[in-house]
Image (tube, rainbow, N blue to C red):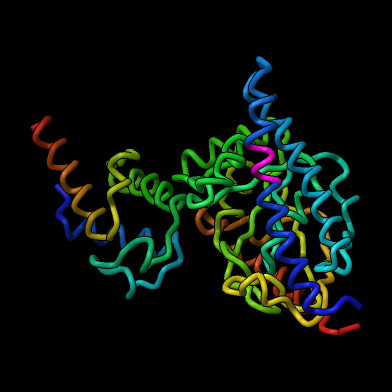
């Protein structure tokens, strides 16, 4: 097994590679893409495809260098009929979005304002046409357009990274969007062997063991009938959010693999 | 004409019935977002529900500066007074 010292260096290298990759994309790929008179939506499609392949490469790169020992995905066949879907996932590590987007070629995510305005990565997320976390009306319109174009949406309902071996209470955004736009919700339960790159954890605080990351795609969640009979939308949204949260509480506990190899 | 007290009572009713809030927490100075935990979708739904209840439609630009329960009361009261001034 690779030593911890090496994994600290390798993790640093991964961060540098990620940032250099973003620099390469903004300074070389975007100017070249801009030479072609393509409509904005088609440029966004190319950029999202590029992000998909870059993230696939990056997941392999992290396994090759050592910070990640294994990366498994299960149940992707549940979404073979194309979607669009709303993917909801727990958010244990910084790289969850990279892992998810490396599995799903056509998807978008809601970007918090600070990343949207980021001096460096902001240009990438804006050019990819991701959705900025804005007021409800604009957000719903942006999501509707995105679903119409066939893109699925990734949401971390906790709104921030999960605590070690658990989850925070869920925000209602996913249920709000799902119920208003009638989009099926696919849970992705992320499990791992030891907490890695959590919120507040510095990049060099690498865990004792290399990360084993598993993404379990579940079949779309059907809203239980009794919850559907809630009198009005706000109550339905609250009920559905509790349902999502219970689902993740149950599955992150059951699947929590603290065994160490 | 509805008094501020009437409007407050309706808002309290909507917030407890529709948004599952405790009646005791819905006080005039409560912040809809930080104290009562509404999100911006809920704010839109609140405006829609209150329109059914009071006949007053709050548009997005009127909703935006609203933070507390009493802001909602004041805004609706002002609109009712304006409507009355126009018609009366």
Q: Is residue A211 left or right of residue B70?
A: right
Using residue B64 as the reference point, say whether residue A69 is left or right of it. right
**Furthest-top residue in this view:** A37
A165 shown above or below B19: below
Indicate whether A151 appears above or below B15.
Answer: above
Magenta segment includes A133: no
Residue B38 lies, in percent from the top left, at 42, 60
**Residue B9 at least partly seen:** yes
Q: What secondary structure is the magenta-colored segment mainly?
A: helix
A182 over A232 or under it: above or below: above
Of residues B59 and A99, the one nearer the viewer is: A99
In the rendered image, residue A174, in percent from the top left (x then y), is placed at 61, 54
Residue ID at (84%, 79%):
A3
- Identify which residue is drawn at 68% across, 48% down: A20
The quadrant holding residue A227 is: bottom right
> At 56% across and 57% down in the image, what residue appears?
A237
Q: Residue at x 32, y 38 (%)?
A: B59
Could you tell whether A80 is left or right of B31 in the image? right
Magenta stretch in the rendered image: A21-26
In reply to whether residue A23 is colored magenta, the answer given is: yes
Which sits in the foreground, A197 or B29? A197
């Amino acid at each position: 097994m690779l030593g911890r010292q090496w994994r600290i260096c390798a993790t640093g290298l991964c961060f540098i590679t990620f940032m250099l990759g973003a620099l390469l994309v903004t300074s070389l790929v975007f100017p070249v893409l801009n030479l072609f008179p393509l409509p904005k939506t088609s440029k966004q499609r190319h950029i999202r495809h590029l992000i998909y392949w870059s993230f696939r490469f990056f997941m392999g790169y992290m396994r090759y260098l050592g910070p990640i020992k294994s990366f498994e995905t299960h149940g992707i066949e549940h979404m073979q009929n194309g979607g669009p879907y709303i993917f909801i996932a727990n958010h244990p590590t910084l790289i969850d979005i990279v892992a998810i987007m490396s599995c799903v070629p056509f998807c978008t995510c809601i970007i918090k304002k600070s990343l949207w305005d980021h001096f460096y990565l902001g240009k990438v997320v804006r050019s990819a046409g991701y959705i900025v976390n804005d007021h409800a009306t604009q957000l719903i319109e942006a999501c509707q357009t995105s679903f119409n174009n066939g893109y699925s949406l990734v949401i971390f309902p906790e709104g921030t990274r999960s605590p070690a071996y658990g989850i925070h209470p869920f925000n209602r955004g996913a249920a709000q969007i799902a119920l208003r736009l009638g989009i099926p919700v696919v849970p992705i339960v992320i499990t791992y062997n030891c907490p890695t790159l959590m919120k507040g954890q510095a990049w060099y605080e690498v865990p004792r063991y290399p990360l084993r990351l598993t993404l379990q795609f579940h079949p779309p969640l059907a809203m239980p009938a009794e919850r559907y009979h809630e009198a009005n939308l706000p109550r339905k949204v609250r009920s559905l959010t509790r349902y999502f949260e219970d689902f993740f509480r149950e599955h992150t506990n059951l699947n929590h693999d603290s065994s160490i190899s | 004409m509805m008094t501020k007290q009437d409007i407050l009572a309706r808002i309290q009713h909507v917030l407890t019935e529709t948004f599952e809030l405790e009646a005791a927490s819905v006080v005039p100075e409560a912040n809809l977002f930080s104290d009562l935990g509404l999100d911006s979708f809920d704010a839109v739904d609140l405006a829609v529900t209150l329109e059914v209840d009071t006949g007053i439609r709050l548009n997005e630009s009127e909703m935006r500066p609203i933070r507390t329960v009493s802001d909602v009361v004041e805004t609706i009261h002002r609109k009712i007074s304006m409507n009355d001034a126009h018609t009366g």
